[in-house]
Image (cartoon, rainbow, N blue to C red):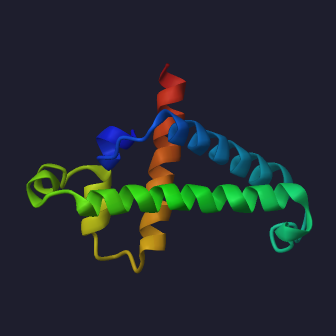
Amino acid sequence: ICRAGLCYEASDAECLRLLNDIEVTTQVVFRIFAMIPLSSTFWFAFAKGRECHAAVNRTMAFAQKALDHYRALPPATKRGAATTIIGCIEANPAYASDEERCAEIITFLVGGHDTTALQV
């Protein structure tokens, strides 16, 4: 997904960290935040909340790294990648910030991983 959709060759360590962070975030959001009122507001008060917060920050940093990598590509390479996920996200003026772009990149990564895993 990273190579084809983001024009970014993630290392094995980055992939494993990303998958772990997405798993941690998903578990905390669906098992704790969804079940315990105000836990998402007071995430800093419990260990799993702090772990989730750190995982979200690392995941957003990964998405920003992929976006920065795409932006640094030579113009000829970008033209060839204009119809990739990241090319469409970067070219879309509807995004107000890189934070919104990174959130969208993560959405595609999670959705693509889930779809691919189910097909295998």
Q: Residue furthest top?
A: 120
Residue 81 appears left or right of 50: left
Give the x, y percent position of residue 91.
24, 67
Q: Residue at x 26, y 63 (%)?
A: 71
The N terminus lies in quadrant: top left
Residue 60 appears left or right of 102: right
Give the x, y percent position of residue 14.
52, 42
Q: Residue at x 35, y 41 (%)?
A: 9
Q: Residue furthest left?
A: 76
Q: How many marks?
A: 0
Give the x, y percent position of residue 38.
88, 71
Q: Residue at x 91, y 62 (%)?
A: 46
Q: Does the image show residue 31?
A: yes
Q: Residue furthest bottom?
A: 96
Above or below for 84 versus 102: above
Q: Nearer the viewer, residue 83 or 20?
A: 20
Give the x, y percent position of residue 108.
45, 49
Q: Residue at x 46, y 63 (%)?
A: 102
Q: Does the image show residue 34?
A: no
- The quarter of the picture where residue 90 lies is bottom left
Residue 107 appears left or right of 83: right
Q: Nearer the viewer, residue 105 or 47?
A: 47
